[in-house]
Image: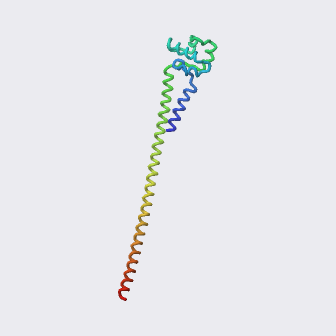
Amino acid sequence: MKKLFAVLFLALFSLSAFAAVDINTATVQELQSIKGIGEQTAKAIVEYRDANGAFASIDDLANVKGIKAKKLESLKSELTVADSSTAEKAAEEVKKEATTAATEVKEDAKAAAKETKAAAKKAKGKVKEGAQEVKEEVTDAAKAVKSEAKDVAATHESKASHKAMK
């Protein structure tokens, strides 16, 4: 299970940490995470996108109020205009990694269950052996007590008959 979470975390982290922000899907908050984009510029980008549709390229940001050529150049490395196939490929890759991790976890769980079952069987055998030893010891002790009781009874009987003769 830990492997599955680790793979999912790494996959999601790698997608977000190294991926540029898609200006066609980013929220105001996501846009503000980019150095050089404040609240007003982020709102202007989202409002422009809502009014005019998706950006065809990053250069289309020049049409947004407050973004000049110099600012646009400084932002280009942080932004992207991803097509839907890029997101689908990333999602497929994450799904593939998650499936692989889930399979590994399932195999590990099966192996652990098999080991546990074998250990339980071994323990059961040891318990049976121990129980048999205790049974034998109790049987031997019972025989000894019975023999001792016979000896004591015989001694008392002998003393009683000896007294009766006197």
Q: Is residue 150 above or below residue 94?
A: below
Viewer-nearest residue: 110 or 24 = 24
Position in image of residue 152 (x %, y %): 40, 77
Position in image of residue 91 (x %, y %): 49, 27
Colouring of the image? rainbow
Viewer-nearest residue: 38 or 163 = 163
Viewer-nearest residue: 164 or 60 = 164
Relative side of 79 to 164, left or right:
right
- Give the mark count: 0
Q: Is residue 91 above or below residue 39?
A: below
Position in image of residue 124 (x %, y %): 43, 55
Residue at the limit of the structure toward the right, as seen here: 70
Q: Residue at x 53, y 29 (%)?
A: 12
Relative side of 53 to 153, left or right:
right
Position in image of residue 146 (x %, y %): 39, 73
Q: Residue at x 48, y 30 (%)?
A: 95
Q: Quadrant of residue 133?
A: bottom left
